[in-house]
Image (cartoon, helix red, strand yellow):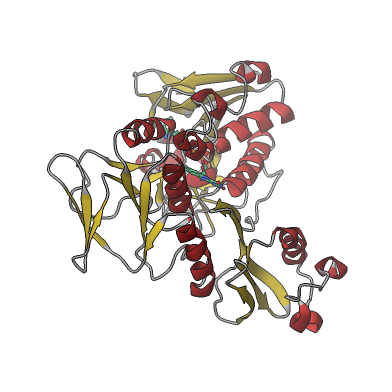
């Protein structure tokens, strides 16, 4: 059985390894458009900061793929899928009569029995004047990081547009590299997807104490400069100086291949609980799967590593043995280290209908703790500089433990959360 994986990121590589483990005789090919073997995107920050070398980015030794029995094709852009099998009703798909094929940019064609689309995402840049100037960047790939690192050595100030998780880490990397950095955030506070205003205030104070400037409530209107960017203009006419500008304003799933082949695409490639892609008519495909930043499950594109790994494993199991594994979502959990602080957000960290919250704020000590409860059970949390609580709270959320009797004491320093497990 020939398994073909498009994408050599964490989802593609995890799936390739899982397929070989479950079915050593399977033929596994990974096609990756980038010229490099798998590297860890989070390490790009340390690379830009000058703390590690390019060789340190690679997660596995160069011969890892061969050792696993995976055939790796680098610099291999898949340009189209043969839509014939995708457009038909599943009952019509007889393996002998229908092509399962994809085409590469160099014109060659590859046949598959099972296909995984692990094509990831690309940075999204909102409409803004002047994004074509020299010195304007986004960060997704090693190629981007190399360009950013080289440019950063020629300037002394930078603006990061976007005060989300990736933006703040990028700001920190550039600051470590010796630049004066200003973060410009559209929302009234940092990390709008993970934090609430009070938590963000604590984080902003920590960042500013480290020398990273923060401007919130700021919509970028234009990047100014002749050929090279030298400042930005905000909608309220304020000017922010910066010789390089980095957009960190979200991602969009890489869906072109899937869309052109007639698969069901919304924000990402729509998948079911077996990670099977669907045809445009909503029927699942039998042989085409998607995972990672490219995939949309129950309306959600996660955009982070843990769900990419989980999805890849489930997809791989089903590629080897159809229907053998089920995915029911991943508890979103992110930990950010910034300005010496450790910030973790778990599950539903923003309170919505029917939920209540408990909060503990200690600005002086840089502590912030918030728990979100629904029906007496923890469903989310934000923890700033509170590492020892991450594990028990994750377990309480995962296990759906009823904590209502102890709600008043949950945030107390001396309350042992583990006693509830
Ligand atoms: C700088 C940075 C830091 C990050 N840090 C964290 C972090 O700390 N924690 C966290 O959870 N997440 C982090 N993320 C997000 C995380 O990297 C992504 O969630 C993860 O990479 C998704 O994996 P993936 O395999 O789905 O996609 P990707 O890693 O994007 O890999 C997809 C690959 O598919 C290739 N591809 C696409 N189309 C084709 C085609 N047609 N033919 C051939 N190849 C193709 C692409 O070139 C790419 O190499 C970070 C992201 C960035 C950019």
Q: Residue furthest left?
A: 226
Near-viewer residue (32 or 299): 32
- Residue 304 position within the rendered picture, expressed as x and y whole percent measured from the top left: 54, 49
Q: Residue furthest right?
A: 419
Locate residue 301 relative to residue 158 in the image: left or right.
Answer: right
- Residue 219 position within the rendered picture, expressed as x and y whole percent measured from the top left: 28, 64
- Residue 185 position within the rendered picture, expressed as x and y whole percent measured from the top left: 36, 62
Residue 61 seen by the camera: yes
Q: Is residue 163 above or below residue 23?
A: below
Locate residue 132 relative to residue 416 in the image: left or right.
Answer: left
Total marks in image: 0
Query: Going 70% across and 46% down the picture, which residue do you hit?
Result: 325
Query: Going 52% across and 74% down the picture, which residue do you hit?
Result: 198
Near-viewer residue (258 or 44): 44
Locate residue 66 relative to residue 408 in the image: left or right.
Answer: left
Query: Going 47% across and 24% down the picture, which residue do you hit?
Result: 36
Using the rendered view, name the quadrant where residue 359 is placed.
bottom right
Q: Quadrant of the N terminus?
A: top right
Q: Quadrant of the C terminus?
A: bottom right
Q: Is residue 243 above or below residue 83?
A: below
Near-viewer residue (383 or 341): 341
Q: Is residue 368 above or below residue 73?
A: below
Residue 193 seen by the camera: no
- Residue 121 position within the rendered picture, expressed as x and y whole percent measured from the top left: 43, 43
């Amino acid at each position: 059985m020939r398994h073909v994986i498009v994408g050599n990121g964490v989802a593609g590589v995890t799936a390739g390894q899982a397929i070989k483990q479950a079915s050593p005789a399977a033929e596994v090919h990974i096609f990756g458009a980038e010229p490099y073997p798998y590297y860890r995107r989070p390490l790009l920050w340390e690379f830009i900061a000058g703390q590690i070398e390019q060789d340190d980015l690679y997660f596995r030794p160069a011969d890892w793929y061969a050792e696993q029995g995976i055939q790796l094709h680098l610099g291999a852009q898949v340009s189209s899928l043969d839509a014939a099998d995708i457009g038909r009703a599943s009952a019509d798909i007889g393996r002998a009569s229908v092509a399962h094929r994809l085409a590469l940019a160099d014109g060659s064609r590859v046949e598959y029995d099972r296909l995984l689309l692990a094509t990831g995402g690309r940075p999204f840049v909102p409409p803004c004047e002047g994004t074509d100037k020299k010195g304007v960047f986004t960060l997704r790939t090693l190629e981007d990081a190399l360009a950013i690192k080289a440019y950063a050595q020629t300037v002394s100030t930078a603006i990061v547009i976007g005060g989300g998780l990736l933006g703040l880490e990028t700001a920190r990397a550039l600051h470590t590299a010796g630049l004066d950095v200003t973060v410009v955030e559209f929302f009234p506070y940092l990390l709008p997807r993970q934090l609430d205003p009070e938590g963000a205030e604590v984080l902003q104070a920590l960042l500013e104490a480290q020398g990273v400037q923060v401007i919130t409530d700021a919509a970028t209107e234009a990047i100014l400069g002749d050929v090279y960017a030298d400042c930005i203009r905000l909608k309220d006419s304020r000017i922010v100086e910066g010789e390089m500008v980095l957009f960190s304003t979200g991602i969009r799933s890489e869906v072109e291949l899937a869309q052109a082949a007639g698969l069901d695409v919304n924000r990402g490639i729509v998948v079911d609980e077996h990670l099977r892609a669907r045809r445009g008519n909503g029927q699942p495909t039998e042989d085409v799967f998607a995972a990672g930043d490219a995939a949309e499950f129950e309306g959600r594109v996660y955009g982070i590593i843990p769900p990419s790994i989980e999805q890849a494993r489930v997809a791989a199991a089903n590629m080897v043995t159809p229907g053998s594994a089920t995915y029911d979502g991943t508890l979103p959990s992110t930990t950010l280290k910034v300005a010496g602080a450790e910030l973790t957000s778990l599950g539903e960290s923003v309170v919505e209908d029917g939920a209540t919250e408990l909060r503990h704020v200690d600005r002086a000590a840089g502590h912030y703790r918030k728990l979100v409860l629904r029906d007496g059970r923890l469903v989310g949390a934000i923890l700033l500089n509170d590492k020892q609580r991450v594990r028990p709270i994750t377990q309480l959320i995962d296990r759906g433990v009823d904590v209502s009797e102890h709600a008043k004491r949950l945030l107390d320093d001396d309350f042992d959360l583990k006693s509830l497990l």
